[in-house]
Amino acid sequence: MKIVAVTACPTGIAHTYMAAARLEKTAKELGHEIKVETQGSLGTENALTESDISQASVAIFAVDIHVEGRERFKGVKIIEVPLQEAIKNAKGIFEKIQG
């Protein structure tokens, strides 16, 4: 399954990147293809393209703040969870997607 994700926290430092890494690792373990955009203190990194988004079956928003450019995801199923859930229970997020 192709998945896109956005991670973001209020300070945009460690937790944003920890969540991204955890989602990437878990997706790989479960056989999914994922691209994660981080919205942190350095701005948007690894920005998702229109093509990335249109090809995705689902978008995961692991965020504690408003997602910049949320309108880009119109028509895509969105699973929104607190940032900590992506860090502590990424597998559970993927179970929600498949369930």
Image (cartoon, rainbow, N blue to C red):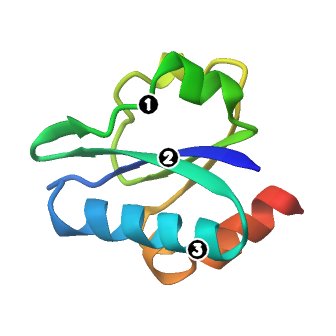
Q: Amino acid at mark 2?
A: Lys
Query: Pointer 3: what residue?
Result: 26
From this view, report whether residue 72 is shown above or below residue 76: above
Q: CA distance from mark 3 to mark 1?
A: 19 Å
Nearer to the camera, 76 or 82: 76
Image quadrant in which you'd find residue 75: top right
Image quadrant in which you'd find residue 13: bottom left
Q: Amino acid at mark 1?
A: Leu
Badge 3 or badge 1: first in the primary sequence: 3
Q: Residue at x 27, y 55 (%)?
A: 9
Where does residue 54 sit, x and y in percent of width and height? 66, 22
Query: Pointer 1: what residue?
Result: 48
Is 83 displayed left or right of 28 in the figure?
Answer: left
> At numbered mark 3, what does the secondary structure look like: helix, strand or loop?
helix
Q: Residue at x 14, y 55 (%)?
A: 11
From this view, report whether residue 33 is shown above or below residue 84: above
Query: Pointer 2: what residue?
Result: 35
Is 41 displayed left or right of 93 in the figure?
Answer: left
> At numbered mark 1, what does the secondary structure look like: helix, strand or loop?
loop
Classify 10 Å Cα crowding around label 3: few (below 14), some (14-19), many (20 and above): some
Badge 3 or badge 2: first in the primary sequence: 3
Badge 1 or badge 2: first in the primary sequence: 2
From this view, report whether residue 51 is shown above or below residue 78: above
Q: Mark 1 and 2 residues: CB-CB less than 8 Å, in contact?
A: yes
Q: Count the numbered circles shown.
A: 3
* Residue lying farthest to the right in this orientation: 99
Q: Residue at x 39, y 68 (%)?
A: 21
Q: CA distance from mark 3 to mark 2?
A: 12 Å
Where does residue 53 sit, x and y in percent of width and height? 59, 27
> At numbered mark 2, what does the secondary structure look like: helix, strand or loop?
strand
Q: Amino acid at mark 3?
A: Thr
The C terminus appears in which quarter of the rendering? bottom right
